[in-house]
């Protein structure tokens, strides 16, 4: 449905949406919480910043933050801003001249893409944090983003929000 | 939504479903009509034959044919038989232990995959041939599968079915 790059972009956006502090998060911190290799993630973060989903902050305490409040950024916004958006089928992929509209095969495939696109457009990052089920993206049972790379938990800037708050 | 390999598998299946003759089609013939490089297509055809979507016939007049009537093969059957099926999300891709069910992000993504899966399961190859719109998969305006590789049209074994039939 979506590429690995798009999945990683969504994880990073959800991580930043869930943080309880306004200070930027470093690429290393985001990489740990999202379990994405930091080099790969840095490219994605820079792409999202170029597309105005994130703001990039330089300096020792620099990093990345959301450019808008989580309720103003949809899942589709993040996908479109990543290098791997959902690819709708706009014309015959075979280049058949007579196919001025999509054939039944490509209509079927594109209809599913259109449906997914509508669903992703109507879901904001805050919807994902407030969603039903009590299993928050990226958060483990103790309410913390799991740390998989550094192997230690400094923790103060990245507790998952308490669902009761 | 689906991979290039899956798209090519579907084109091949639709081509074989649309043929008006029961004799097998050669990989070369299928490659021309589906505009897929023949070497790549041969691998896909062999995979589909191993998964009982196609039958493979040896010899000078050999090739590939559908293993069942087109109404008995769904789009999902072809996707599942290809090396690139629709990948549902069955457990947390991050491996977070507390996530015994999917979080809201992966629930959203999987819900769209599930919806597409249901749609593909309920659409047969014959549905694609009989679908509305009059634009038949692979067929050009003159009612023929376009020939893009060999550059000539021998034609007798591959006219697209007449919509009025």
Image (spheres, coloured by chain):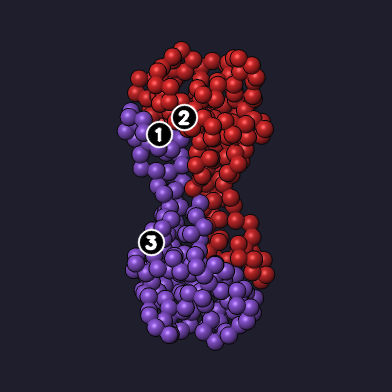
Chain colours: A purple, B red
Residue at mark 3: A81
- The reply to whether the C-beta atoms of the residues labelled 3 and 1 are less than 8 Å apart is no
Query: Where's residue B56, x and y in %?
Result: 64, 24
Q: Which mark is residue A94?
A: 1
Q: Residue at x 39, y 65 (%)?
A: A47
In the image, residue A75 lies at what x, y percent?
43, 62
Q: CA distance from mark 2 to mark 3?
A: 32 Å
Q: Residue at x 66, y 71 (%)?
A: B98
In this rendering, does residue B89 appear at all?
yes
Residues at badges 1 and 2 in contact (C-beta under 8 Å)? yes
B165 left or right of B57? left
Q: Tell me: residue B59, above or below residue A60.
A: above
Q: Nearer the viewer, residue A111 or B85?
A: B85
Q: What residue does disc 2 label? A: B34
Give the chain letter at badge 1: A
Q: Which of the two discs, 3 and 1, labels the residue nearer the N terminus?
A: 3
Residue at 48% x, 59% y is A5
**Residue B76's image quarter?**
top right
Q: Residues within 10 Å of mark 2 (few under 14, many from 20)?
A: many
Residue B14 in picture, x, y percent from top left = 51, 29
Across and down, in percent, residue A16 comes to 46, 75
Looking at the image, which residue sits at the far top? B156
Q: Disc 3 and disc 1: Cα gap in Å?
A: 27 Å
Q: Residue furthest bottom?
A: A156
* Alpha carbon distance from label 1 to label 2: 8 Å
The answer to whether residue A57 is above or below residue A99 is below
């Amino acid at each position: 449905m979506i590429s690995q790059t798009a999945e990683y972009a969504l994880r990073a956006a959800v991580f930043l949406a869930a943080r309880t502090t306004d200070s930027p998060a470093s690429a290393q911190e985001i990489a740990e919480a999202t379990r994405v290799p930091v080099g790969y993630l840095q490219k994605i973060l820079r792409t999202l910043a170029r597309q105005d989903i994130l703001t990039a902050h330089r300096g020792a305490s620099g990093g990345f933050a959301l450019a808008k409040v989580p309720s103003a950024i949809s899942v589709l916004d993040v996908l479109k801003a990543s290098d791997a958006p959902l690819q709708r089928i706009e014309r015959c992929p075979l280049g058949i001249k007579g196919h001025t509209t999509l054939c039944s095969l490509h209509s079927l495939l594109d209809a599913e893409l259109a449906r997914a696109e509508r669903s992703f457009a109507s879901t904001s990052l805050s919807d994902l944090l407030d969603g039903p089920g009590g299993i928050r993206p990226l958060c483990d049972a103790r309410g913390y983003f799991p740390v998989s790379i550094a192997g230690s938990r400094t923790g103060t800037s990245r507790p998952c929000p308490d669902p009761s708050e």
